[in-house]
Image: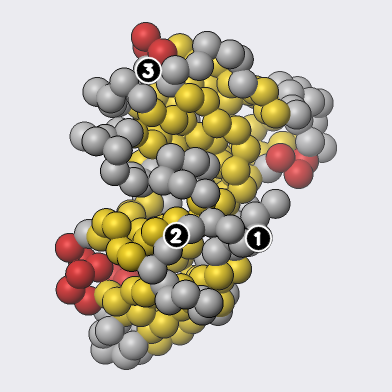
Amino acid sequence: NSKVIQTPRYLVKGQGQKAKMRCIPEKGHPVVFWYQQNKNNEFKFLINFQNQEVLQQIDMTEKRFSAECPSNSPCSLEIQSSEAGDSALYLCASSLSGYAEQFFGPGTRLTVL
Amino acid sequence: AEKVIQVWSTASRQEGEELTLDCSYETSQVLYHLFWYKHLLSGEMVFLIRQTSSSTAKERSGRYSVVFQKSLKSISLIISALQPDDSGKYFCALWELVMSNYNVLYFGSGTKLTVEP
């Protein structure tokens, strides 16, 4: 079973508010991924890290999202100014390497009112 | 174009039966991995099984096995002896090796399985 921890499980924000979620990857996993799963079950990759460094991120993440994976602290994903379209399940996954299976956390369900 | 296609959005079986979930994918890479995940109602994505493109072995993990038809770019997940707890949404995912970069998983749209007792 996965030991990726995500908090909070549920998050409700108003439009324009900041929304921050955290992820503790499985112990020993240096690679962390963030995905957005919308109500149509479509997965969108947002950003990934190896240790503390960003490896890849999409444009949306560069502009309105900020993310970090500091050493000895949880990884975090923050939406600077929430929009209704950001309502989704945000999944964090970790893996031993970029090509190993990814283990997912339970997700943070964000609702933007 | 979608890289991973799961044609069936829903499936229903009786307890004890066997089920095959189909998935097709598109890639031009030589090396890639295919994964099956189960998405629980809690939101958790549970890793089930992996198939590497270079492997001819028939991957198996407990009641899960796959049928990998590389030339057809198809991978099916077979779940034997179905139990009600197998109910959930099953996702097929593709990982490609592109110039040694760390890459991401491309997910299909999922198949929701209901197992009746």
Labels 3 and 1 in the same subunit: no
The quadrant of the image that shows the C terminus of chain B is top right
In the drawing, what numbered circle is on residue B73?
3
Three-letter amino acid code at the position of disc 1 = Lys
Residue A15 image position (x, y, % from top left): 29, 86
Residue B93 image position (x, y, % from top left): 44, 37
Marks 2 and 1, the one that precedes in the sequence:
1
Mark 3 crowd level (few <14, some 14–19, many ≥20, 10 Å Cα): some
Horizontal placement of B26 versus B39: left or right? left
Mark 1 crowd level (few <14, some 14–19, many ≥20, 10 Å Cα): some
Task: Measure the alpha-carbon separation of dots 3 and 1.
Answer: 32 Å
The answer to whether A85 is drawn above or below residue B57 in the figure is below
**Residue A18 visible in the shown view:** yes
Three-letter amino acid code at the position of disc 3 = Lys
Q: Quadrant of residue A37?
A: bottom left
In the drawing, what numbered circle is on residue A3?
1
